[in-house]
Image (cartoon, helix red, strand yellow):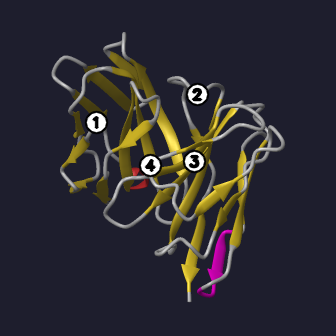
Amino acid sequence: DGGITQSPKYLFRKEGQNVTLSCEQNLNHDAMYWYRQDPGQGLRLIYYSQIVNDFQKGDIAEGYSVSREKKESFPLTVTSAQKNPTAFYLCASSIGDRGNEQFFGPGTRLTVL
Amino acid sequence: KQEVTQIPAALSVPEGENLVLNCSFTDSAIYNLQWFRQDPGKGLTSLLLIQSSQREQTSGRLNASLDKSSGRSTLYIAASQPGDSATYLCAVTGATNKLIFGTGTLLAVQP
């Protein structure tokens, strides 16, 4: 069953803590993306990766970090430097990075207590 | 800077009605346009992808059109059903090679 999985579904964080959101895909896609969704706003790109061991900042990368050690995995760390981390986080992947259809995971809702 | 706008922000229709959702974008230099569906608290489901060289795409009761020169796309839903209730998002891939999203149209189909 091919697809994109994200875990956990819900995550609670205390202020000052770093947390890592998991994203795994078995679609054999080269490109992977992280987006943030806030109420009343469109999705905004945090980071993206075109190939293993390479990634680029998106529009709102401050306070976040990523790694791409394996093709299947693209974890996102929300650091304590992110001032307003409460949001819905979505991971996506595509065959390539240029104009290809993106497929999304089910999302992780992060709440800062 | 590319901006994507979706009008209306919310729409309520009776079951069985045909409807049109609108998407406009400010920069016509796009690679493609994608329509997504999002159910509450869920991820996005890709509905249709229109390449810049295409005028429309169809999937079942859905038909999406693209007019690059005017910066507009429409998503036509035929014979709407309560199960079509969701938020519909459009997004364009432009020269920056990134997906730029609109804020969505919340559709409610009343039984």
For the residues beneath circles 1 and 3, the answer to whether they share a chain is: no
As helix, strand or loop, the secondary structure at mark 2 comes to loop
For residue A8, which numbered disc appears in the image? none
Q: Is residue A13 magenta?
A: yes
Residue receiving disc 3: A47
Q: Nearer the viewer, mark 4 or mark 2?
A: 4
Which amino acid type is marked by label 3? Tyr
In the image, B15 versus A85, the foreground residue is A85
Spatial CA distance of label 1 from label 2 is 18 Å
Which amino acid type is marked by label 4? Asp
As helix, strand or loop, the secondary structure at mark 4 comes to loop
Spatial CA distance of label 4 from label 2 is 16 Å
Spatial CA distance of label 1 from label 3 is 18 Å
Q: Is residue B60 above or below residue B111?
A: above
Residue receiving disc 1: B2
Q: Is residue B35 magenta?
A: no
Residue receiving disc 4: A59
* Labels 1 & 2 near each other (Cβ < 8 A): no
Q: Earlier in the sequence, mark 4 or mark 3?
A: 3
* Quadrant assignment for the N terminus of chain B: top left
The residues colored magenta run A9-15
Percent x, y of residue A86: 50, 75
* Quadrant assignment for the C terminus of chain B: bottom left
Q: Earlier in the sequence, mark 3 or mark 2?
A: 3
Residue receiving disc 2: A97
Q: Is residue A92 above or below residue A17?
A: above
Spatial CA distance of label 4 from label 3 is 8 Å
* Labels 3 & 2 near each other (Cβ < 8 A): no
For the residues beneath circles 1 and 2, the answer to whether they share a chain is: no
